[in-house]
Image: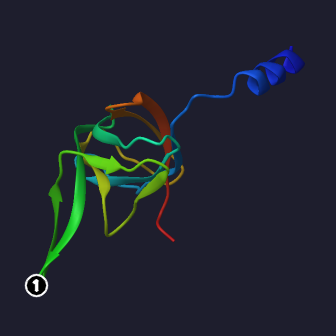
Amino acid sequence: MNTLLAILFVLFPSEDKIEIKDAWMRPSSEKMATALYFIIENKSETADTLFQVDSDLAERVEIHETYSEGEMMGMRKVNFIVIEGKSSFELKPGAHHIMLMKLKKNINDGDKGEFILHFKQAGEINITATAKMPK
């Protein structure tokens, strides 16, 4: 059976045009907020757009960016992130990230969470992120 699967993968390579790597989130407490980070690799020639993220971990999930205007820094909601063809986009601390607001439970170091990423071209992609403190 394993040999048959290996042959099928060689003859019919995966059509995944978007790959998600290194998904992680910060530990946090119930009713508080946390952030989700990951790398999006777009293997296609065409740009794709992440426009929504869903999770049962929080009451609200939004795409955010960190900004700086003069001496002020803050975070604000953005409606989407465009990932150009044949490129990658990293969501990381101090930059773009996914905010989980009003957590429904504690998220402790090592806990796992499920997320659904919605892309215009690639459709829905399910990922699992592990809670850990940043390095």
- Dot 1: within a 10 Å radius of its alpha carbon, few (fewer than 14), some, or many (20 or more) residues? few
Q: Quadrant of the N terminus?
A: top right
User: Is disc 1 placed on a helix, strand or loop?
Assistant: loop
Where residue 21 appears, as percent x and y from the top left, is 54, 49
Write down the residue under mark 1: 70
Does 5 appear above or below 30? above
- Describe the colour scheme in one phrase: rainbow
- Taking the image as shown, residue 53 lies to the left or right of residue 71, namely right
Residue 32 in percent (x, y) is at: 24, 52
Answer with left or right where residue 5 lies relative to residue 72: right
**96 or 106: nearer the eye?**
96
Q: Please state the horizontal and vertical placement of residue 117, each as a whole percent of the image.
A: 37, 35
Rendering coords of residue 60 (x, y %)? 20, 40
Q: Residue at x 40, y 48 (%)?
A: 107
The residue drawn where x is 83% and y is 21% is 7
Left or right placement of residue 11 versus residue 23 in this view:
right
Residue at x 77% of width, y 19% of height: 8
66 lies left or right of 27: left
Question: Which residue type does callout 1 highlight?
Answer: Gly
- Tally the marks: 1
